[in-house]
Image: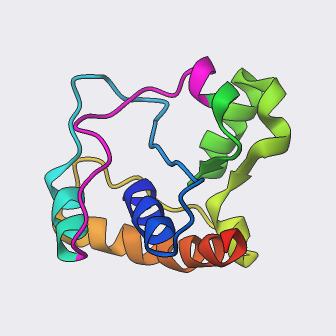
Amino acid sequence: MAAAYLQAKTREAGLNEYEFCSAGLRVSRADSVSQGAREILAGMGLRPLQIGSQLLSYKLVRNADLVVCLTKEVLQSVASEYKFAAGKTILLQSMTGQTRDIFEPKGASVELNRQCFEMMKPDLDTMLRRFG
């Protein structure tokens, strides 16, 4: 949801130099974007950026300008696995000075996906203001 939202908002602002993708540490290529996430995005007039989930890889991390994590556990895992990315890996909530984790809504109801997005939105909007 975050990647699709950021991609759409940067395009609306004419900031076409930014590209976003979503990847996880515990996903399979067979996993699809959840129905709950699809419904939340559709409610904003958006679509997922990809059909299925993708596993975080060396190539994705190497090519990224910024790696954004939702939980401290994921942040630590990325930092441990991809030591070269330490300077470009952040906790999303750090955008607004928070340190709380945002839960992973994978397979959750539409309502839990909505709650997750609402938790992310202030940080995503702060990130967008910094891009602009």
| Residue 90 vertical placement versus 62 (above, below) | below
The residue that appears at 73% across and 24% down in the rendered structure is: 82
The quadrant of the image that shows the C terminus is bottom right
- Horizontal and vertical percent for residue 32? 20, 37
Main SS of residues in magenta: loop
- What is the quadrant of the N terminus in the image? bottom left
* Magenta stretch bounds: 44-60
**Residue 48 part of the magenta segment:** yes
Question: Is residue 52 shown in magenta?
Answer: yes
Judge whether 40 appears above or below 58 on screen.
below
Q: Nearer the viewer, residue 64 or 54?
A: 64
With 75 as the anchor, is 112 left or right in this view? Answer: left
The residue drawn where x is 45% and y is 71% is 9
Q: Position of residue 3 (x, y in %)?
A: 44, 54
Q: Which one is in front, 88 or 120? A: 88
- Residue 99 makes an appearance in the image: no
Whether residue 47 appears in this view of the structure is yes
Is residue 11 depicted above or below 104 in this figure? below
Against 126, residue 31 (above or below) is above
